[in-house]
Amino acid sequence: MGIFDFLGGSGPDKALKLKPKVTQKYGDPTSRQKAIQQLGEMKFPEAVTVLMHRYTINVEPLTTDADEKEHVFELIKGFGKDAIAPVSEFLRKNEQATSWAVRILESLQSEAEVVSTVVDTLTALSSQYMRDPEKKVVLLHYITGKQDERIAPALLPFLDDMSDDVKLAALKALGPLKYAPAREPIQKLTTGDTARRVQMAAAQALQESGFQA
């Protein structure tokens, strides 16, 4: 019988049971911090998943919030390669904490590997309406300036996104790539009922690409 059996359930079960404490915004922070530390000492993918949910809440004071999130970052890094799968899954499934998930993956993988994960995630998001476009914007900003043949095709659908912020991020990423199939979709954004700031960004993207408006 292992130590986690005495604590009530298997290791993974124990990790999952700590989620309410990790995401507890109010009350004594000691309980939340103790749960975070316990999870960091477990070597199960479920522990990483629960730790990631600490990034879905903000607590007061902000200094405590920042310190805890940095501590969680270091704990997850301590899992090494075992953290990659649960963090990648969290990135795919959750709308929050996108920048933290990417930052953790950057600390554990090569740039090419992170880009591949981000492109896969963007491809899955391309046809989804999201009330809050932050996740799309964060991922689009990440791949801006990166070199990978999969990036440009993955960007095209976001030129038709409902959010102007998403369109702007996609245009900024597409411009320097000089991707010929993007020419016509970008040109369409320079006219019609498109918001003025999007029209200006589209014109700039055309110029960067070497395409004529």
Image (spheres, rainbow, N blue to C red):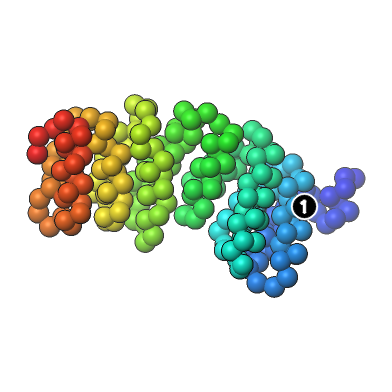
In this figure, what is the number of numbered marks? Answer: 1
**Looking at the picture, how far across and down is residue 165, in whole percent?**
30, 54
- The residue lying at 41 percent from left, 48 percent from top is 138
Horizontal side of 7 relative to 43 (left or right) equals right
Q: Nearer the viewer, residue 190 or 83?
A: 190
**Looking at the picture, how far across and down is residue 194, in whole percent?**
16, 55
User: Which corner quadrant holds the N terminus?
Assistant: top right
Would you call the spot at circle 1 few (<14 residues within 10 Å), some (14-19), or many (20 or more)? some
Q: Nearer the viewer, residue 199 or 62?
A: 62
User: Which corner quadrant holds the C terminus?
Assistant: top left
- The residue lying at 37 percent from left, 56 percent from top is 133
Residue 7 visible, this orientation = yes
**Looking at the picture, how far across and down is residue 62, in whole percent?**
59, 63
Residue 46 visible, this orientation = no
- The residue lying at 66 percent from left, 44 percent from top is 74
**Looking at the picture, how far across and down is residue 87, in whole percent?**
57, 43
Q: Secondary structure at mark 1?
A: helix
Residue 59 versus residue 79 in the image, above or below: below
Residue type pointed to by label 1: Gln
The quadrant in which residue 83 appears is: top right
Residue 43 versus residue 50 in the image, above or below: above
Residue furthest front in the image: 63
Residue furthest bottom in the image: 27
Q: Which residue is mark 1?
A: 38
